[in-house]
Image (cartoon, grey):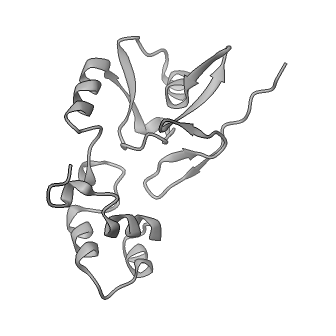
Amino acid sequence: MRSRRAIEHEIDENGCFVCTSHSPHRGYHQLKRNGRVQMMHRWIYEQIYGVVPDSAVVHHICGNTLCINPLHLTVKDRSLHIGDHRRGIPGNKGELNAASKLTDVDVMAIRQDREHSNTWWSKKYGVSQTVVSSVRLGKTWKHLLSGGK
């Protein structure tokens, strides 16, 4: 009998628990339990809070599909969840996201600034240089870009 692989994670600057022990598949971490493949975030939610009805999904409040932090997970009716995704609103964006350390004003200041380095901004707001770089390159906070979703 094979032993179960331990679930390991790192905590990012938004408090997300990002799994480091399992590779993601199609944007989500999976694991095999009781002979079947399951979404890791759903399995973790059910271990802590109980069984999720078939009519519901475990939703990432933080918007990070790689997050397995139980405090960032909630149950949402499947039809509402699908409707939100079709309308382009998978989760709270920007400063409406409870896990965000930046505000819309902060992001606009970072994008407009040409004087300071990513290191300077990361220290100012207590985020990683990767977060600042992603903001500047328009990879994150896209809703603040003209025509962004």
Of the pair 77 and 99, the residue shown nearer to us: 77
Q: Is residue 135 above or below residue 89?
A: below
Q: Where in the figure is residue 72, as x and y percent of width and height?
A: 42, 39
> At 56% across and 22% down in the image, what residue appears?
38
Residue 30: x %, y % from top left: 58, 30
Depth check, front residue: 1 or 73: 1
| In-image side of 36 versus 69 (left or right) | right
Q: Where is residue 103 shown, x and y percent of the image?
A: 25, 62
Q: Is residue 25 left or right of residue 77?
A: right
Residue sitting at x 23%, y 31%: 86
Confirm whether residue 128 shows in the render: no
The single residue placed furthest to the right in the displayed view is 1
Front residue of 64 and 127: 64
User: Residue 55 at x, y = what percent?
Assistant: 35, 12
Residue sitting at x 66%, y 20%: 33
Q: Is residue 2 above or below residue 85?
A: above
Snapshot quadrant of residue 144: bottom left
Residue 145 as seen in the image, left or right of residue 72:
left
Q: Quadrant of the N terminus?
A: top right
Tell me what residue is drawn at x 26 percent, y 81 percent. 113
Q: Could one spot residue 86 in this view of the protein? A: yes
Q: Residue furthest top?
A: 54
